Amino acid sequence: MTKSRIAIGVSRLSDNYANWLNKLHNGLEIIDFYSIDVGELASRFESVSGLLLSGGGDIDPGMYDREGDLVYCKGIDKWRDKLELSLIELAFMFNIPVLGICRGLQMINVARKGSLHPDIPAFVEGSLVHQDSAGDVYHAVRVDQDSLLYKLTRANDATVNSSHHQAIHRLGEGLRGTAFSTDGIIEAIEFEQSRDHSFLVAVQWHPERMDFDNPLSGLLGRGFIEAAAGRKQAP
């Protein structure tokens, strides 16, 4: 019997994400949700087997009751904020595997009523450099061994790229941190209880721009694709 094609919905697609996804699994169907009307999302979700929330600009701080911090923010796209909240709601409703990357991690946290540091250097004393205008920076992370992220990658201490000036302040409901940089910034999240959702992993780094042999890129991505494939093939 021929297996059904795996369809991955992306909140906003770019060549980096498309190339990484195709490297993870040849023959994926990739759907860019950014150009789809919110009213059509539910019907389009019928064919989606996994959701990737991609990186991008800052989230409107009014979404986590810090309107006064707008001065620290850049690249706000209120349409995308609204779109991704709807995508997350649908993914949780239909138990679709979710992978969040950078902004994607932050949006999941906000959707679960968490908050963000609007600017790491301004709000986190003694923080590492997490963003540089010249390109990605790199730092170490420690992964909690009692986590889905560790189960997928078997990476405990590793080096990741970094290109973000915001970070989780207050964790959202039902979420826990599963990877941390040495300054205490939360670098990955998932649900506290695995029964809350079949697959949710979100990371602050950019696996699509990392060496594919780094387990926090290749193995992480493959774990997401396998979860999506398992949902697609379920009776």
Image (cartoon, rainbow, N blue to C red):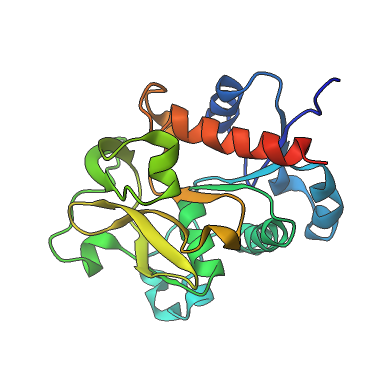
The N terminus - image quarter: top right
Residue at horizontal 40%, vertical 50%? Answer: 147
Number of marks present in the image shown = 0
Could you say where residue 61 lies in the image, as x and y percent from the top left?
Answer: 47, 72
Whole-percent x, y for residue 67 in the image: 45, 79
- Position of 46 compared to 86: left or right? right
Residue at (61%, 57%) from the top-left corner?
Answer: 197
Image quarter where the C terminus lies is top right
Q: Is residue 3 left or right of residue 199?
A: right
Q: Is residue 152 above or below residue 212?
A: below
Q: Is residue 231 above or below residue 91?
A: above
Can you say whether 218 is above or below 52 in the image? above
Closer to the camera in the image, 77 or 38: 38
The image quarter containing residue 141 is top left
Query: Is residue 218 placed above or below 104 in the rendered structure?
Result: above
- Residue 70 visible? The answer is yes
The residue that appears at 73% across and 37% down in the rendered structure is 31
- Residue farthest to the left? 126
Counting from the top left corner in percent of width and height, residue 7 is at: 74, 35
Q: State the image coordinates of residue 186 (x, y, percent, origin top left).
A: 32, 57
| Residue in view at x 20 percent, y 48 percent | 129
- Quick check: can you spot residue 58? no
